[in-house]
Amino acid sequence: MQRLRASDLQALGAPPKGGAQQIENWLRNMLQGGTIRLKSGLMELRGSQPVATTLGDLKAACGVAMETVKQGLRALELEHWVLLVDGVHTRLLGPPRFRVSVTKENLSGSVGRAIMIAPMEGLNPLESIDYDQLRRAEEVAGRKRVLVMKRVTLHWTKRLRLASGEVTTLPEGLTFTLAAGSQVSSAGRSGRITEDLEVRSLDGREVRLLQPGRVIREKDGELTLRSRARLQLERSNLVRLGDGRTGLLEVHSRAALDPVTELDWDEDSHWLGRFTDGVPLVLLRRVVLAELHGVVEQDCVGVGGQPSPVWRVGLGVHDCILDGSIPFRAGQCPLRRSPEVLMEFLQGLEDGSSLREELAVRFGFAVDEADVRLSPAMFAGPGLRELLRQVATDPALNSELLAIGNRVACWTQVGAYYRKWEAWPWEVTRETYFTFVDMRYRQQPG
C-alpha cells in the first residue's frame, strides 16, 4: 500500500484554506491524471497497489476542519471510490476497468467458449479480486436470459424510385422488366438472374415470370425457371417500366411483434426473406450474459452486506426467429396450434439452456446446414443502440454499471439454419455483441 502524507499532498497542490468544493475539485483532477510524480518518483494511482492517506493528513495539508475534508470526499465516493477505512485511512482509487468481450470465432452459436474477460490497466476496488482467476475458463459461464417472446408477422412492400426522382409504391399486377444481375430468392435460396426478364408484380415482394429464365444461386449453381414461376425480390434491383422509364426497385420488410412494436434489424432484415412467405414466426430474444463464479465479490471487505458469489455482465442480445410450424412439422400438433405449442416449449428454457439442443431433443430439428455471416465492428443504429442501452443499465442483468457512450460499438453474427435436404430455414438468428464493455464499480448507497 502506497501512503500519501501531508507533505506529499501539499506537493500535489492541496488547496490551502480551501472549502469543500475546492478540495473536491483538486482531488477529482488529481485522480483523473492516473500517474502522479513525487520526489520519490512516479506513483500510479491506478496501479497494482492501493493508494492511501488519512483524514488527518488531508486536514493538515489543506489547513481546514475535519468536517470540510469529509464534505469534499463525500462527492467523490461513487465516482472515484474514495473509501473511508475504519474512519482513519482514506483510499484514493481511480476508476477501475475490466474489458469483457466475445471473440469472432463464435460460429457454433455457443458463446460460453468465446467469452474473454481481462482486467485493463486500473485498480479494482473490490478487496477480494484475484486477477489470475479471471483467466480460468471454469470460473466464467455463458448464460442467456429471456427478454421477449412473441409472434412475428412479416409485411413486405415494393418501393419504386424512378430516375426522375419520383418515389412510388409498386402496384400489384404491373408488368415490368427486371435487369440482369438482379438479386432474387427461389425456394429459399438467394441468387441472381442471368438476363433481363419480364415479370409481373404480385403481393408483397413476389413477382411472376412471364418468360423462362435462369438464376445462378450461391451454393447450388444454375437453376432454370419456367414461365409463370414465382420469385421473391431482395434488396434493390434495377427495373424498366413498359413506358421506358427506369428506376430502382427497393424491397422493404416490416416485422411486427404487436400493433405498436416493430422488430428493427436494420441492414440484416433481408435474412428474414429466407422463410417461406406466410409461415408463422416466433421471436425469442435473450440477453447474453457472462457470469463469474467465486471470483468477484460485490461488496468491499468491511462495507455493505453479504458478498455475492456470482458477478454478471451483459455482453449483447440474441434474437432468434423460429418457424412457428416446427411442432406441426414434427407431427406433435395441428398447424393452427403450432406457434402456441412452440412458445410453451420456449417458456421452459432456463438461462443455461441451449436452444438448439433442446429443439433437437423435443422436435427432432437439428442443424444440418448453416449459412453464417459475421459483420465487421460497427456502431449500432438507433433501434439497436436503444436495446443495448437497456441491457447495459438493467441492474437485474449486470452487477456493475456498463459505461456506454453516444456511439455503441458492436458486431453481429447473422445465420440461417436448415435441416438436411430442406430449402427453407427453420431458424434465422442474429447475435449482437458489444465490441468491448467497460464496467465501472458502483457502490450502492447505504
Image (cartoon, rainbow, N blue to C red):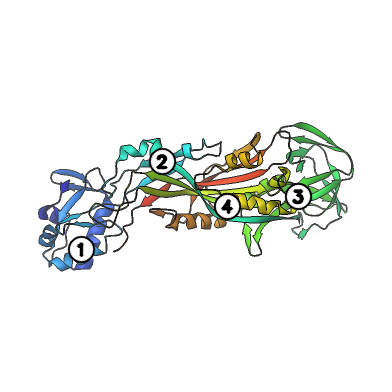
- Please say if the residues under marks 2 and 1 sit with CB atoms less than 8 Å apart: no
Where in the figure is residue 382, as x and y percent of width and height?
55, 57
Instruction: Name the residue at 21% across, 65% down.
Output: 72
The answer to which of marks 3 and 2 sits earlier in the sequence is 2
Q: Amino acid at mark 2?
A: Val
Return the mark for residue 347. Answer: 4
- Left or right, 362 with respect to 83, comes to right
3D distance between C-alphas at marks 2 and 1: 41 Å
- Judge from the rendering whether residue 132 lies leftward or rightward of residue 67; answer left or right: right
Q: CA distance from mark 1 to mark 4?
A: 54 Å
Give the residue number, with chain letter if any, for mark 3.
277
Q: Which mark is residue 23?
A: 1
- Dot 1: element: helix
- Crowdedness of circle 4 by 10 Å Cα count: few (<14), some, many (20+)? few
Contact (Cβ within 8 Å) of mark 1 with mark 4: no
Q: CA distance from mark 2 to mark 4?
A: 25 Å
Residue 121: image x %, image y %?
31, 43
Residue 18 showing in the rendered view: no
In the structure shown, which secondary structural element does the residue marked by tag 2 occupy? Answer: strand
- Residue 28: x, y in percent? 26, 58
Check whether the beta carbons of the residues at disc 3 and disc 2 lie within 8 A of each other.
no
